[in-house]
Image (tube, rainbow, N blue to C red):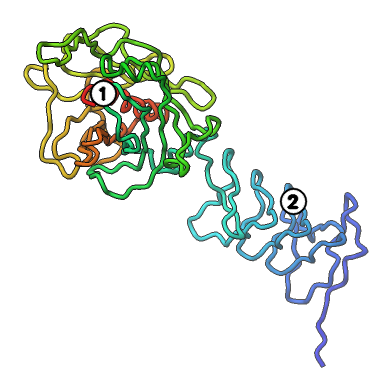
Amino acid sequence: MNSAKVQPEFGNMQAPGGMQMMDRNVVVGQPVPMDPNTGQPMMMPPMQPGMVPMQPGMVPMQPGMVPMQPGMVPMQPGMVPMQPGMVPMQPGMVPMQPMQPGMTPMPMQPGMMPVQTGTAQEAVPIVSSVPWVNVMNRSALFDGVTMKQTTRDWWRSGCCQANFEWTAHEYTHDYGEGDAIADKLYIREDADFCGRFLSCCAPAARPTRYDVWAGGIPEDGNRPPEKDRLFYFEKGCTNGTHQCIGCDDGGKKIMCPCCCYLPYLKAHDASGKEMGQATYICDEKLCVPKFGIEDASSNLRYLIRPNTCCCGCMPMFKCGGQKGRCMHVPFYIRTPEGEMVTPANPASEQAEITQLWSGLAKSCCERENYSVNFPQQATEEDKVIIIGATILIDMALFEQEQ
């Protein structure tokens, strides 16, 4: 007959502060937990209804720890005790796994939030409280964008200028018309008829607004609600980059360059707050188009212009690229001093805005495609303004051809 020897119970022994000794029988051979400061048996608070008895391997209650609550998971061997700043275990959270050698416990940080993943939750950083920033990042538009004009208003020609529509897609360096890429942003113009009617005589002069929404072209073809837009671009009435001053004997328009009150396109977030603007720049090299990217305080952030030839008087073409880049004029994004900047996507050597050949069908319908590789150091606001600069380049330079 086996009879385990036990030490006397400590249940009737009182300790300072009204605490009791460990109220349990201790089997001989199993050490009694001792207080490291006093060397005396560990003082434990009286057992309360619903508390879990002390199990072998559990860590004794320490100052600052949260008492066991209904629904909490008991401390398991290998788990890290609750530390100041940690979030208490909530229903649906996954219990902390045993720490591996070399690992450091990571408490919840300000700005992190629990995100539901199946039946578990995990902490992930909030990218931004600004909706359009989150959409840009989730849509993989953080390093560049491919922009395409739609062909729905195929009849647009001369004075019959419909409102423009664009779709924006993930950056594809060698995009060719017909390649399948998902729509990420939908851009639609809202300009009056008179401004559009005269755009052939004064490109980019009309007052207009371009609204931007997440996703692609609506299935019903209608304009999405204004309250759902992410951001928008707008401009007032200005001079065009060139003005028609008459026609020659053959009936061809005579265009005179303008150097004052030039086109621009301001970027605003959904609330109307200005983020900055893209502007057309005129200098002594009239045949070389140049654009500036300015922040909300009118500080010049980037300069956009092509490389030049003929002593800097003419833009330089590039040939021999793949697909839409077979022949193109890259508008390089530069520092205000004119130096090249590192691109966010290493597919191209410099950050740039490039007009791509849009294929035979689109060329007949007078539609353009653009590939935009953002600067590596560009802010989220810079990227939005550069998208606006792409639209302004099309308005200022290529509507004359259309």
Q: Earlier in the sequence, mark 2 or mark 1?
A: 2
Q: Where residue 183 sits: x, y (%)?
A: 39, 43
Which residue in the protein does label 2 denote?
A: 66
- Tell me the kind of residue under disc 1: Gly
Residue 144 in sight from this viewpoint: no
Which residue in the protein does label 1 denote?
A: 158
The residue lying at 71 percent from left, 69 percent from top is: 56
Q: Quadrant of residue 294?
A: top left
The quarter of the image holding the C terminus is top left
The residue lying at 87 percent from left, 72 percent from top is: 8
**Within 10 Å of the Cα at label 1, are there few (<14), some (14-19), or many (20+) other Cα atoms?**
some
Front in this rendered view, residue 180 or 194: 194
- Left/right placement of residue 117 relative to residue 305 reads right
- Left/right placement of residue 278 relative to residue 175 reads right
Q: Is residue 165 above or below residue 47?
A: above
Q: Quadrant of residue 300?
A: top left
Q: Where residue 191 sits: x, y (%)?
A: 41, 21
Front in this rendered view, residue 89 or 161: 161
Q: Where residue 169 sits: x, y (%)?
A: 35, 41
The residue lying at 18 percent from left, 25 percent from top is: 306
- Tell me the kind of residue under disc 2: Val
The residue lying at 42 percent from left, 43 percent from top is: 139
- Left/right placement of residue 95 relative to residue 67 reads left
**Within 10 Å of the Cα at label 2, are there few (<14), some (14-19), or many (20+) other Cα atoms?**
few
**Furthest-bottom residue in view?**
1
Residue 246 in sight from this viewpoint: yes
